[in-house]
Amino acid sequence: MIKNYLKSAIRNITRNKFYSVLNILGLSIGLISTIFILLYIQDELSFDKYNKNYKRVYRLESDFRISEKHDKFAVTSVPIAPAMKMEYPEIEQYARIVDNGNMFIRYKDKEFYEKKIYSADSSYFKVFTCEFLKGSLDKALTEPNTMVVTESFAKKYFGEANPLGEVLRDGDNMNYKVTAVIKDLPGNTHLKYDALTSMATIAKVYGKDQFNSLKPEAFWNVGIYSYILLKPNADIKNIHAKFPAFNKKYMEPLGKQINADFKLITTNLADIHLSTKNLEGDLPRGSMSYVYIFSFVALFILLIASINYMNMATSRSANRAKEVGIRKVMGAFRAQLSRQFLSESVLLAFISLIISLAFIQLFLPLFNELSDKHLTFGVFSNPFIFIGIIAITLVVGLISGSYPAFYLSSFMPARVLKGKIDSGRNSGYLRKTLVVFQFVISIMMIIGTLTVSRQLRYMKTKDLGFDKGNIVVAEIQDTVFVKKIPAFREELLQNPAIEAVSASTGVPGKIRSIQVMRVETGSKMQELALNNFQIDYDYIPLMKMKLVRGRNFDKNMGTDLKEGVIINETAAKKLGWGDNALGKKIQYGIELDGTADRNTKVIGVVKDFNYASLHNKIEPIVMFLTKRPGFALNIRIKPENKPATLDFIKSVWGKYGVKNPFEYYFLDQNFDESYQAEAKLNKIFTVFSVISIFIALLGLLGLASFTAERRTKEIGIRKVLGSSLMEIANMFYKEFTLLIVVAFIIGTPIAFYALDFWLQQFAYHVNQTWFIFFLSGMLAWIVAMATISFHSIKAASENPVTAIKYE
């Protein structure tokens, strides 16, 4: 019987070539899309699970409340991890990691800026799993000025030579000896680095006693990633239960003085990448909501492809009615007929699977580029996905063929052999319902694509309160060069292509310094944690920020350097000053004895500007004046002939004897990198929206062909009675237009609420408009009408005599 089922299935597939091709094409595209999405989801869910002890590793995080300001950070203070290891026997080991930023590295004639170099404790390799290719775990990072590099980093600098013992030099002429080489990290890790320098190097620079200090003030300055490895069978809940005693011993003495408290947050290593916590200073991570979105997209695409099969199989039921009748007369049971029709759909699904597997490797590089991943797929390298795909294909085949199988096998042999089969009312309703469902999904996908695109465009074009265009930023690592900045600035300004030059300790998108200050509130001074950074006299004019009250820092006002500060509008509002902010006091650099390093007054208020991405609301910020700010050199240039201007800056840079080569980025491009996740979502969503619509249109094409074929006699009679070609074509258009209108009515409210939930992730976002929904419905209608036009016009153009004779 199985052989007979397969033989019948193959015959029917080959007999109806047009409909079989449409089904196979739709299912193949659906399976290819599903495999890609499953690979994406698998990669997202597998982050950091390559670490042998990932279930026992937790990242320590900070929850601060200082007066009314509440902040959560992915980083902690330097001493908290080692202090917790001393206090808690449940902790087996700890490891701390700190980002070294854009680090200049030199080896002989090779010079590069490296953005992925961290400093780490020697215990790092006892907490995280790394494969050593050269060197040993016991000696890695134990001494100051040592470095562990990845395999690709070693080849970049040393080629095929043995890197052990070789010395690399940074921008401050500090040497680092390579003591080990580890295998490149897998792509599914939240900690992505090319090399690690020893934490002992930082301790040496700052002094071991100061770096390892357990004084209360050391626990209130955060800036380092801390991880703990629990002993087997230890529970993280016990750590939290005991933490109040730890807090009282180490942190409460200073906390009471500054009206602050601290709570410990922990996240398991495997949960960091998809964590829903919104933590300051967190490393780039994924989004669980995107995993859910793509899961639904994969499901919808498969459903659309399955619906195509159902529609075409039931629509052609009359053509197979006599076959069913004869088989039943010959003794076939309904169950046997159901199995026969199910075998056809399953066979067709597996033919589609074979085709999709043949094209996976061809399109995988394109999908990797689209998703910014390094996914691989193979039967043996990824058996779980392969087995899952086989199971999904089987389910798709069964779902696709289920209704046709039970519907066709239910025909009464006496009626169908006499040609008295009701071919249509119930099956017609089902076909229309399935078409509506397909277009509900398609319209939702179009609305989603257009809305995501609008939000991305809004984030890139919104008025941020400053002009981010044509600003070149060079990060300063040469401490000697900082003293030469005034002369460097003056020489640059001799070139008419350069409009302004300024230095600062932060640039929009990279301002994350929070300090406890005292601010004037009524008749007293109150401790608050405020965002802040240091600028020079030219920073506000260069950024084209607007002063709404007061003035900018003035070189002719000698008191500005130590006594003046500028705040934003939000600071004036939240500190309760309103329009009376000028002259209000802010104390900066508070010591334990109550004294302050600087006693300042507000001299100006700038219009609010987005110094972080649009994911976050604008918060109060304080700008201090300094003669020699480091970190960033900001240069505003004219948009004309940028290459020549950059060459000029580079020549002046070298003229001043800067140790590091001139490396720069444009502020607007760097700021837009904050929206990489949204840009990636937009690309992927657009591609899969097109795919879902295309599969739906394949089904519509087949259904339009069948409808035209079934109504051949009716069309002929209408033409004989005088109907024009357009009148007959409109008969088809009206039928399918009604279905799309129903799909639009159902799909738009679902899309509205789903997108409203997504948009709430942004502090600043577009509003949903009726035009986007209307445009989405019109696009769906236009492509649907274009799809059915061929068969409707062809049918309307036939000779009516031939059509009637044919019937």
Image: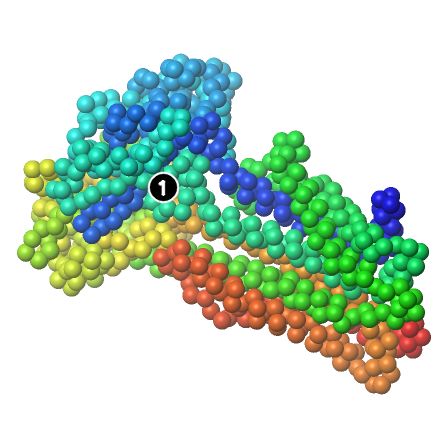
**Image coordinates for residue 36, horizontal then vertical, percent:** 61, 44
Above or below — where is 773 with respect to 347? below
- Looking at the image, can residue 636 be seen? no
Above or below — where is 539 with respect to 304? above
Instruction: State the count of labels.
Output: 1
Which residue lies at the image location 64% right of the left edge and 41% below the top edge? 388
Residue toward you, 315 or 554: 315
Image quadrant in which you'd find residue 326: bottom right
Image quadrant in which you'd find residue 724: bottom right
* Residue 405 placement, left or right of 324: left
Which residue lies at the image location 22% right of the left edge and 50% below the top edge? 69
Above or below — where is 767 with respect to 113? below
Element at label 1? loop
What residue does disc 1 label? 282
**Image coordinates for residue 321, horizontal then vertical, percent:** 86, 63
Residue toward you, 543 or 308: 308
Most extreme residue toward the bottom, as rendered? 721
**Image coordinates for residue 391, horizontal then vertical, percent:** 67, 43
* Residue 596 placement, left or right of 688: left
Q: Residues within 10 Å of mark 1 (few under 14, many from 20)?
A: some
Quadrant position of the N terminus in the picture: top right
**Coloring basis for residues:** rainbow
Residue toward you, 624 or 634: 624
What amino acid type should be assigned to the residue bearing mark 1? Asp
Which residue lies at the image location 40% right of the left edge and 55% below the top edge? 761
**Image coordinates for residue 447, horizontal then vertical, percent:** 54, 63
* Residue 91 placement, left or right of 244: right
- Looking at the image, can residue 596 be seen? yes
Residue toward you, 18 or 172: 18
Which residue lies at the image location 70% right of the left edge and 76% below the top edge? 734
Above or below — where is 398 with respect to 89? below
